[in-house]
Amino acid sequence: MLHIACPWCGLRAQSEFTYANDGTLIRPDLSNDSIDDHYNYVYARDPRRGIQDEMWRHSAGCGQFLKVRRDTLTHEIHATGAPQDDLDVPKDDRS
Amino acid sequence: MSRYSIFSLARNALTGHRNWPKAWRSPNPKPAYDVIIIGGGGHGLATAYYLAKNHGVTNIAVLEKGWLGGGNTGRNTTIVRSNYALPGNTLFYEHSLKLWEGLSQDLNFNVMFSQRGVINLAHSDGQRDAYKRRGNVMRINGIDAEYLDRDEVADMVPLLDTSPDARYPVKGGLLQPRAGTARHDAVAWGYARSADSYGVDIIQNCEVTGIDIENGRAVGVQTTRGAIKAAKIGTAVAGHTGHLGAMAGLRLPFETHVLQAMVSEPLKPCLDMVVTSGVAHAYISQSDKGELVFGGDLDFYPTYAQRGNFPRIEEVVETMLTMFPTFSRVRLMRSWGGVIDMTMDGSPIICKTPIDGFYIDGGWCYGGFKATPGSGWVFAHTIANDQPHELNERFTLKRFETGAVIDERGAGATAHAH
Ligand SMILES: Cc1cc2nc3c(=O)[nH]c(=O)nc-3n(C[C@H](O)[C@H](O)[C@H](O)COP(=O)(O)OP(=O)(O)OC[C@H]3O[C@@H](n4cnc5c(N)ncnc54)[C@H](O)[C@@H]3O)c2cc1C
Ligand SMILES: [Zn+2]
């Protein structure tokens, strides 16, 4: 069971949360008519073996989205914060 | 290769089974091959076998970072079926099922393919309609399918709770009688032994750490056992497809997730077919050893760890017990996880890539075990001819750009939703 610290509710069990998406994706502006940019946002992903930033939602809690910095090899959670936060824990990309 | 038969069994029994020859060699890697296949699971080994058998290409190495079948081939719930509804999938999976039907003879290795039937339960009017429609698609394509009403399901699976007050009342189900299960390890071993007999080098404990590219062409790989050159390189690494793609500089439409499965303590025979429910996702069968083998959903967050978390185990067990309340006192013996490559439409990718000489076979999501023979068949064709077989023409990377996705669930571009 992962324990995830919601920035608003505190430490809660994984079963209260829903994984949403890769936390580094930024939706291209609608005025951007590059197919590649939209393709990259919707479909392409970086395979991160190691630490990655993700968006989760505290779906069975406050309902807010949060950012989670998590290790995909160990499941260890290094930091959490609001979506707009810069998480300040060192980021080593092991892959 | 010395053939396995009743005579070889008798002969070896006389010498106390001490003189069986090794099933395959353990060669050191040569400096260069015509083709390198990365990944010694069922798909990689089947590809090497069909390259040799169907296309006469035998100067091949299969590179496996661990041991043969130690990936998802040896971790899955072994359900084999061909009940897909969308063009691209339907005939591909049926071709694979036909290969399964002759596989033990072809490989001279008992893969214990058991056509015990797979039933998908319908729990709502909408699901019933969808299954009937799917059954019709199958039958139009010459594939066996039969829609059963609730009473017929109850007759066929007596332990299933089909009462009206079940948590998910059963309306009926779509049966594919020719579907079933197989012995997973035997599939890897059988393909390995036959590929080896054509001279294919199967090299274990050899992890690929880099892809060498010169002028837009793949020319070799870096491995933990040194550099190896090859004119053509195919990858069949399941959950590591995105990772291998990144080594070649490609950013691919995959996410890697963990799927768990579990077995109970062995019981006397009580469930003689595979039963699946899509409403609360669960699939269950009984192995020849008597264990109940079952699984359900992904853990739903990306991971490369080959282990999952407890909430999913609890949920899968709960779901299974709503279907079969009678198993409530059976003890769980083991659970495990495998990392799988989820695509953005839930269908596989078997194709050439923008890099000449670099080919991908991946995106097997929840269900690539059944595809093992068919996948090896068309991937071998794609590598040998540098163009797809008609059965994998649609399994391209391009389809995500052009919109020709093959999305059986209609779940859209969310990898873990398929
Ligand atoms: C729990 C679970 C249940 C499943 N149930 C079913 C089912 O009922 N029916 C069904 O049809 N499918 C099922 N599947 C899916 C099925 O198991 C897979 O799609 C299929 O086995 C994939 O085979 P493969 O040969 O592509 O991959 P694998 O068997 O995983 O082989 C890939 C190999 O590549 C190796 N590798 C990875 N990276 C490298 C590297 N850098 N260098 C060298 N080697 C490398 C790995 O060690 C591995 O052995 C299930 C999967 C899981 C995890
Ligand atoms: Zn919260």
Image (spheres, coloured by chain):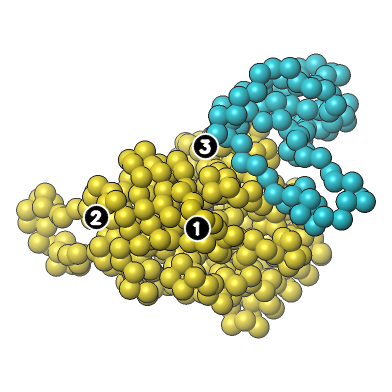
Residue B79, compared with residue B86, is above or below; it is above
Q: Position of residue B232 (x, y in %)?
A: 43, 61
Q: Amino acid at mark 3?
A: Gln
Which residue is depicted at the point 74% across and 61% down?
B401
- Residue at the disc numbered 3: B306
**Chain drawn in cyan:** A
Which residue is depicted at the point 63% across and 70% down?
B394
- Residue at the disc numbered 2: B24
Specify whether disc 3 shares its chain with disc 1.
yes
Which picture quadrant has residue B300? top right
**Chain drawn in yellow:** B
- Confirm whether residue B116 shows in the render: no
Residue B155 falls left or right of residue B61: right
- Residue at the disc numbered 1: B217
Which residue is depicted at the point 46% across and 49% down?
B212
Q: Earlier in the sequence, mark 3 or mark 1?
A: 1
Task: Give the spatial CA distance, label 3 vs label 2.
Answer: 27 Å
Q: Amino acid at mark 2?
A: Trp
Q: Position of residue B111 (x, y in %)?
A: 36, 61
Residue B157 - label: none
Q: Amino acid at mark 1?
A: Arg
Q: Cβ of disc 2 within 8 Å of ligand 1?
A: no
> What's the chain of the residue with tag 1?
B
Residue in front for this viewpoint, B375 or A92: A92
Mark 2: secondary structure: loop
- Confirm whether residue A9 shows in the render: yes
Residue B62 falls left or right of residue B245: left
Q: Cβ of disc 1 within 8 Å of ligand 1?
A: no
Task: Give the spatial CA distance, label 3 vs label 1.
Answer: 32 Å
User: Mark 1 near mark 2, Cβ–Cβ under 8 Å?
Assistant: no
